[in-house]
Amino acid sequence: MSEVHPILTGEKVILARVRPEDVPVMARHFANLELTAYLGAIGGAFSLEDEQAYFESISKSKPDQATFGIYTREGQTYIGGVDLRTINHRHGTAELGVSIHDPEYWGGGYGSEAVRLMVEYGMYFLGLHNIQLNVFSYNTRGIRAYEKVGFREIGRRRGAIRLGGERFDAVLMDITADEVDMSRMRGLVRLLPATLEE
């Protein structure tokens, strides 16, 4: 197995480029109907071929997207992914997506730390001002994780999701640069003159 080359490191997780050997792990996790329901692919499952195509697409550099794998800091186990998509550099906006694929790591703070790192990365290194996300109202664990990072609900599309004969809301949340503590990111760039960091 190839080594994980950290881009960002937190207390529990490392964000790094996804490795080719992680693709079969992705496919195994995306066969979990509970996981795909949280992601909006209700009743869907993804094959190894689907995940290989996804890996090939994220391996190419795109100016409107930044995608990282989420790895445990201890053991460097691949457990999920996080991305900023539809990045608009002119306006400083993007949409965030995150998934802890492995249920063993759900509810342990791994997702919220990955989101925090990605938000800080987007705000500090990409110059973003506003990051939004969509989450379904039945994903209460996800909503709590986003709120923990500082996201706030800004709207709902009522009854937009149907699951098991019930209707749920699509919740829109966002966070702005003035709500994010950049001190950790500034610490990564020690060589910059102090005037550039302010």
Image (tube, rainbow, N blue to C red):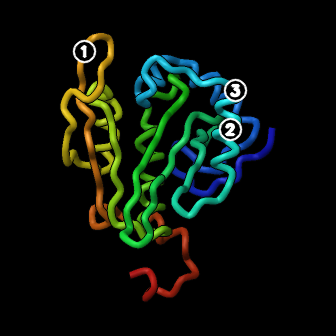
> In which quadrant will I find the N terminus?
top right
Q: Pointer 2: what residue?
A: 53
Spot occupied by residue 44 in the image (x, y as percentages of width and height): 50, 20
The amino acid marked with disc number 2 is: Ala
**171 shown above or below 189:** above
Q: Pointer 3: what residue?
A: 48
Check whether the beta carbons of the residues at disc 1 and disc 3 lie within 8 A of each other. Answer: no
Q: Is mark 2 on a helix, strand or loop?
A: helix
Q: Pointer 1: what residue?
A: 166
Mark 1 vs 2, N-terminal side = 2
For label 3, the crowd category at 10 Å Cα-Cα, with few meaning under 14, some 14 to 19 and many 20 or more, is: some
Mark pair 3, 2: CA separation: 9 Å
Mark pair 1, 2: CA separation: 33 Å
The amino acid marked with disc number 1 is: Glu
Spot occupied by residue 143 in the image (x, y as percentages of width and height): 30, 36
Mark 1 vs 3, N-terminal side = 3
Spot occupied by residue 38 in the image (x, y as percentages of width and height): 40, 27
**162 shown above or below 128:** above
Mark 3 vs 2, N-terminal side = 3
Which is more toward the observer, 4 or 62? 62
Spot occupied by residue 46 in the image (x, y as percentages of width and height): 59, 24
Which is more toward the observer, 27 or 118? 27
Q: Residue furthest right?
A: 1
Q: What element carries label 1?
A: strand
